[in-house]
Image (tube, grey):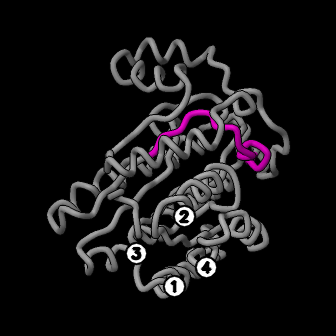
Amino acid sequence: MSYLANKVIWITGASSGIGEALTYQLATIKGVKLILSSRRKNELERVKNSCPLPIQANVQILPLDLAQPATLPLNVEAAIQFFGHVDILVNNGGISQRSLAKETHLEVDRQLMEVDYFGTLALTKLLLPHFLKRKCGHYVTVSSVMGLVGTPYRSGYAAAKHALHGFFDSLRAELWRDSKSIYVTMICPGWVRTHITLNALVGDGSKLNKMDKTTQHGLHPEVCARKMIAAIQKKKEEVYIGGTKEVFAVYLKRFLPRWFSKAVRKMTVR
């Protein structure tokens, strides 16, 4: 039987892109129950209504804002109450950046950290007592190749994603002492063809409002979602999803950091 069969899966950032594609593919797995979260309730309703009709009764909508930590405890309580428990939390919600460090206001760096790091951290910690009580659970956190390497125009975004790796690597080591059945999977996509660049923040905090070439020619969200599901099924600790260049960059940085440092200066990242 599939590891994901009959699981209750909570997905943040479910209203578009990777989260939306993941929702549709999980909806085909026997007995799966889904909780869909993002800020946009109307878009969540659209995604729910786009799922196969038989599973729609097992899809719940839970709007939330990762930038509003005071509201998140009530969100976690509501998520647990929908189906009595949560088996898997997919931390997928977040925002990106397209600006040079020297042009980026500190408030923008703080906003990136608040959403991409602290919002994810808050949900994770708030759900942790539930996982520990049940002695099982699975955190699936969508980081990025930028969580392992840094490139121009991504300083604040890369910093937030790097922070996620530090936290979840530590959490994984700690949870091993409490339960062998609480897992942590880090998903590191490269460029995926979503609207992330349209909503990416520029130096003054406004939105970019255009698609960059690397994202436009990136991996299709459905392909990314399939690879994510395969990684979750195998309970992998970390997986890199993307084209040859993105994945190669991870290994180049790891084994030949000086070469990577020279190569990244000329890398096309927008």
- Tell me which label, 4 or 3, sits earlier in the chain: 4
Residue beneath disc 1:
82
Residue most toward the left?
A: 177
Residue picked out by circle 3: 127
Disc 2: which residue? 11
Q: Name which of mark 1 and mark 3 comes first in the sequence.
A: 1
**Do callouts 1 and 3 mark residues in contact (Cβ within 8 Å)?**
no
Q: Which mark is residue 240?
A: none
Q: Main secondary structure of the magenta part?
A: loop
Instruction: Identify the secondary structure beneath mark 1.
Output: helix
Which numbered disc flags the more N-terminal residue, 2 or 4?
Answer: 2
Q: CA distance from mark 1 to mark 4?
A: 11 Å
Q: Which numbered disc covers residue 57?
A: 4
Name the quadrant of the C terminus: top right
Decide which of tag 2 and tag 1 comes sooner along the chain: 2
Q: Are marks 2 and 4 in contact (CB under 8 Å)?
A: no
Looking at the rendered structure, the kind of residue marked 1 is Phe
The amino acid type, in three-letter code, at marker 2 is Ile
Q: Secondary structure at mark 3?
A: helix
Location of residue 252 (image quadrant): top left
Q: CA distance from mark 4 to mark 3?
A: 24 Å
Q: Residues within 10 Å of mark 4 (few under 14, many from 20)?
A: few
Is residue 194 within the magenta segment? yes
| Range covered by the magenta-colored residues | 187-201
From the viewer's perspective, tell me whether residue 91 is left or right of residue 215: left
Q: Amino acid at mark 3?
A: Leu
Give percent across and percent down for residue 17.
68, 50
Q: Earlier in the sequence, mark 1 or mark 4?
A: 4
Left or right: residue 64 versus residue 42 is left
